[in-house]
Structure formats: C-alpha cells, structure tokens
Image: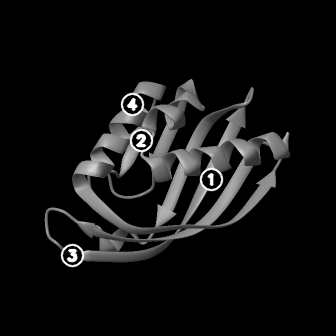
Amino acid sequence: MTEPNLTRVQAMYAAFARGDVAAITSACSEDTVWEVVGPPGAYPTFGKWTSRRSVAEFFAALASASEIKEFTVGAMYACGDKVFVEGHEVGVIKATGRTTDSDWLHVFTFKDGLVSGFREFYDTAQFV
C-alpha cells in the first residue's frame, strides 16, 4: 500500500500548489482528523479539524492568516499506512506582517486509500 499512498500525497501537494482545495479534501475520508500541532487558539491554524468539510475550513483559515511565499516539499517516506514528508515554508503573517521561515514535517495516515489523519509539526513559536 505504500506506493499508492505516496502517489496520493504527491497529488495532494500538486493540488495545494494550484490552490485546489477540493482535490485535497476529496483525498480525505469523511471522518479524517487534520491536526496542526500547536497551542489551540494561539494561531488560526493550530488545532484539530475532524471531518472532510472541516479540512476545507482549515485551508480557508490558512489563506486568511498567512501568505505563503515559498513552500518546498522535500523527501517523502512511506511506512505501512503512513507517509512522512519533510519540507520548508517561508511566509508572512497577515495580521502582523512578520515573516516566518520554518522546516516542517507532515504525517499522513491512510485507511482504505484515503487520508484518515494528518499531523503537521513546525516551529510554532514563530507564528504565536
């Protein structure tokens, strides 16, 4: 199952690059759990979204909170039902104008060919 999962994740990043949120959400299960690790309430994208529809809300929050200047997808690793992706992002927080520059790690969990879980880790202190 690792190869189809890698292919699905690659397609999701391509959709993100085009701004195609519908393609991203269609790769998620109805009850997916999408989480950005950070203190809830400290930044609009920190916390958990617990449905396919709420994943679209996450991307709306992301677009309203920051302007991404650079988004680089690095190495991808698949192991069982998980895909791990390393990357880097440079952006501007719209509310403050402050620039952020952080490496990140995304962890996708798959069930029945769809993303059932997503966790993002990065330098949250830059965003708070």
Q: To which residue does mark 3 refer?
A: 98
- Quarter in which the N terminus is drawn: top right
> Which residue is found at the position 30% from the left and 41% from the top?
60
Q: Which residue is mark 4?
A: 54
Secondary structure of the residue carrying tag 1 is: strand
Where does the image place residue 71, in percent across and percent down from the top left?
A: 47, 66
Q: Earlier in the sequence, mark 4 or mark 2?
A: 2
**Residue that sits furthest to the top in the current view:** 30
1 or 3: tag closer to the N-terminus: 3
Of labels 4 and 1, earlier in sequence is 4
Dot 3: few (<14), some (14–19), or many (≥20) neighbours within 10 Å? few
| Foreground pick, 5 / 14 | 14
Mark 1 highlights which residue?
107
Q: Amino acid at mark 3?
A: Arg
Which residue does the image show at 50% across and 62% down from the upper left?
121
**Residues at circles 4 and 2 in contact by the CB criterion of under 8 Å:** no
Which residue is depicted at the point 27% across and 60% down? 66
Question: Between tags 2 and 3, which lies in front?
Answer: 3
- Asked if the residue under mark 2 is in contact with the one under mark 1, i.e. CB atoms within 8 Å, the reply is no
Q: Nearer the viewer, mark 4 or mark 2?
A: 4
120 left or right, relative to 41: right
Residue designated by label 2: 48
**Callout 2, which amino acid?**
Lys
